[in-house]
Amino acid sequence: MASAFPNYEEEDPEIREIEVLVDDLVKYFEERRFQHEEIVKRGEALEEIMLRHQENLIRENEFLFLLKIGQLYSLTKKDKKVAMDVLSKVVEHDPNVAEAWDALAVCYWDLHDCEKAKFCLENSLRQGRRKVPLRNMSVICRKLSNKYPDKKFSFLEECINLAKEAVEKDVKDGISWGVLGNAYLSAHFKLMKDMDYANLALTSYKEAVNMGTTFNAELYFHQGYVNAFCENYKEALTSLDNAIALDTVKQEPFLLKNELISFLNNDIQNSQIAKSLKVESTSEGSSQFGEDHRMFVHGKVIWSTPKAIYLPV
């Protein structure tokens, strides 16, 4: 990456080394943001190096140092104000530094302030339509479609278009394919337009896995859920097993797998009984659900999911 402050014709090797190290950590975060402990561990080691050489780094290029320490703090500090104070100085000095806006967006996202995160990414994208802020903006629009039901359709459309644009920037980026899959799945839940969006979500998740995004348990869970919903049961169980193998703590993949196995066992048993009684199967069904559940119907299957389940809605 070229220096964010190109006025310095010759960049000090020490500053360049810090740039590379921070950029590598940012990339790691973009790919594996769910591995928070490892990100903090790496960040703390890098912070120690930067603070040890702080005086020299500031003397050589103060605002580049502030940018890099701000990016670092946006990923590692619980108190986001520490990062935001530093990054605000950078954008006040030069509002065209896209990396500073990206890091500020991360801070506001962690604070659950989608509007300010969107504002930061809009400023970032003015400097160039890069895949990472594009897909991050897609995620924010997806969340805003929940917050503003009257603007649901426009936010969902923007959510899908931004994710598609991110994929077009790099068709081999599995993370962008996963974000596109989440956009389609969210649109399916909220718009219920036949199975078109669900099938597009499946295609996107498949591409994400094909492109090497095989370390994300959440992606496999989403893939498993949609496959189960579309009655692709073998594929659903395979995806859920992958999710469980990658994350043994989260209960949602276990619960969905058990629900699916129970349904399949009951379906086999009911089919055998129906044949012996010469009763034709029916696609109609009814069920009672508590207020803590949502209901999705497809074919013979009525799926209920707790509101807390971590689907991209």
Image: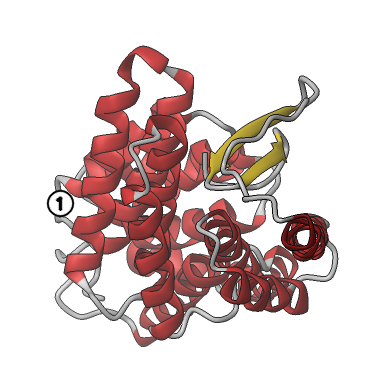
Residue 307 falls in which quadrant of the image? top right
**Would residue 287 appear left or right of 87 to someone viewing this image?**
right
Question: Is residue 313 depicted above or below 198 in this figure?
Answer: above
Q: For the N terminus, give its image quadrant.
A: bottom left
Q: x%, y% of residue 80?
A: 61, 41
Q: How many marks?
A: 1
Residue occupying image coordinates x 34% and y 45%: 138
Question: Is residue 262 depicted above or below 217 in this figure?
Answer: above
- Colour pattern of the rendering: secondary structure
Residue occupying image coordinates x 60% and y 65%: 224
Q: x%, y% of residue 67?
A: 40, 56
**Would residue 66 appear left or right of 172 to someone viewing this image?**
right
Is residue 197 at all visible to an observer of this figure?
yes
Residue, disc 1: 127
Question: Is residue 169 depicted above or below 299 in this figure?
Answer: below
Q: x%, y% of residue 15?
A: 39, 77
